[in-house]
Image (cartoon, rainbow, N blue to C red):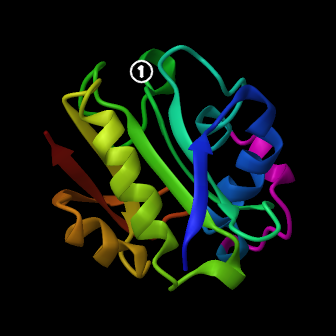
Amino acid sequence: MNVITRPLVKDDEPFLWQMLYYAARMQEDGATSPEPAKTNPDLNKYVEAWGLPTDMGLLALHSEHHQPIGAAWLRLLIGEKKTISYIDDQTPELAIALLPDYTSLGIGTQLLTRLIAEARQVYPAIVLSVRTNNPARYLYERVGFRTTDAVTNRVGSNSVNMLLRF
């Protein structure tokens, strides 16, 4: 499926909260909305006050009705915002998600490859953490991410950290 993409802007923050709900697989943890992410220090750092100078991301819009259907974004999580996948102060962490009706249509691949092309102009690498049972892991491997280590995630299950160096 072809989509329209555009850079994320500050006004996209409400949609990013919704995307974080799916990216963090919060439904598997019993959450029914993105609201708990806003007060969770392990999650809110990915979206809160979106639009910092080092933030980078893309919004996917449906090609016919121009409604948001997904997003991929990078954020430097340094200092007190470090995560279990922290590499260094120059390597941002990736988050990506689509609305459930739009998965498995190639949209995630489109978003990710375009974001990688833009990121390689600015950053030395991209890092992410993904649950081992998340099918998106295969997309990350396909575009060049490599597993660096296994970790226990925020809910106590298994994840892997993955790195893409440019």
- Residue marked by disc 1: 78
101 shown above or below 21: below
Quadrant into which the C terminus falls: top left
Instruction: Tell me if I can see residue 57 in this picture.
Output: yes
Of residues 157 and 57, the one nearer the viewer is: 57
Rendering coords of residue 2 (x, y %)? 55, 72
Give left or right: position of 79 versus 151: right
How many neighbours does mark 1 have within 10 angstroms: few (below 14), some (14-19), or many (20 or more)? some
Classify residue 46 by image quadrant.
Answer: top right
Rendering coords of residue 92 (x, y %)? 37, 32
Quadrant into which the N terminus falls: bottom right
Instruction: Tell me if I can see residue 24 in this picture.
Output: no
Disc 1 on helix, strand or loop? loop
78 shown above or below 131: above
Give left or right: position of 27 versus 161: right
142 shown above or below 115: below
Classify residue 32 by image quadrant.
Answer: bottom right
Residue shown at 85% from the left, 63% from the top: 33
Residue shown at 47% from the left, 68% from the top: 108
Residue shown at 59% from the left, 66% from the top: 3
Give the residue type that dot 1 points to.
Answer: Ile
Residue shown at 50% from the left, 85% from the top: 104
Q: Which residues are magenta?
A: 29-40
